[in-house]
Image: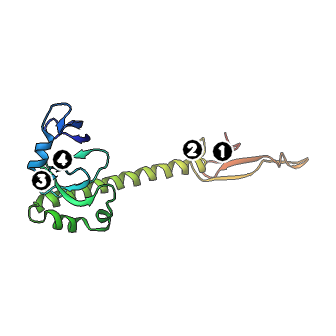
Amino acid sequence: MFNARCPECNNDVEVINGRCSKCNFDISNYMAINGLCEGNQLITDKVFICPNCGDIEASTGRLYLKCSECGHPYKATDIDRKNPIKLFNTDEKQLIEEYVGDTINWDIYNARQEEWSNIQEKRHEYQQQKQAEENARQDAINHPKCPKCGSTAITSGQRGYSFFTGFLGSNKTVNRCANCGHTWKPGK
C-alpha cells in the first residue's frame, strides 16, 4: 500500500492491492504500461520526470504518476526520492537531457520555464512593494508630523522663556513645526 494521486479520478488516495481506493482504477496496470515498474515491482522510491514537458516530480509524501503540468505519464529515473543528491547537484536541463532528451518537447519546457520566471519576478516585485510599504510605515512612526499642517520638518526643543526664571519649564520638551510654527508636546 502507498499514497498516490490517482491518474483517473485525480484524487489523493491510498493504493490498495494496486487499485485506487476511491474509483478502483487499476494503478498497477497504469504504472506497468507507462514503464513505472521493474519486473513485477512498482517503482515508488525514484524521482519521476515528465518525458513531454520536463517537469520533475520528487515529492516524498505522495506519488504523482501523471504530470500536473501537461497530463503526460511520468518516467522513472534512477534518483532516490529519499536521498536526491543527484537531483540537487545536477542542472535541470542536464537531467532532462539524460532521462528524457529524446522525447521532450522543448517548446513546452521553455514556455513553462518562462512562466515560472514570470511568477518568480512578480513574487519578487510583490515582496519589494510590501517591504517599501513597511519601510514607509516605520518611517511614519519614527518621523513625527505636524498635527496642524502635516509637515515632517519638526524640531524639538525646550519650552518657552520667562522674565523671572529664564526658561519657563526648561526641563519640558516641545516639538515645533518649521513650516507653520505650531508647537505641541511630544507624543500628542
Crowding around mark 3 (Cα neighbors within 10 Å: few <14, some 14 to 19, many 20+) is some
Q: Which residue is mark 2?
A: 149
- Count of numbered marks: 4
- Kindly identify the amino acid type of the residue bearing the numbered disc 3: Gly
Given residues 42 and 151, the one toward you in this image is 42
The alpha-carbon separation of the residues under discs 4 and 3 comes to 11 Å
| Residue 73, position as x, y percentages in the image | 13, 49
Q: Amino acid at mark 2?
A: Cys
In this rendering, the answer to whether 111 lies above or below 60 is below
Q: Secondary structure at mark 3?
A: loop
| The label number, if any, that marks residue 35 in the structure image | 3
The x, y position of residue 15, in whole percent, is 22, 38
The mark lying in front, picked from 1 and 3, is 3
For label 2, count other residues whose C-alpha is less than 10 Å away and answer few (under 14), some (14-19) or many (20+): few
Residue denoted by label 4:
65
Mark 1 secondary-structure assignment: loop
Residue at (17, 67) in percent of width and height: 98
User: What's the residue at 15%, 32% (across, down)?
Assistant: 24
What is the C-alpha distance between the residues marked 1 and 3?
81 Å
Which marked residue is nearer to the observer: mark 2 or mark 4?
4
Q: Are marks 1 and 2 in contact (CB under 8 Å)?
A: yes
Q: Nearer the viewer, mark 2 or mark 3?
A: 3
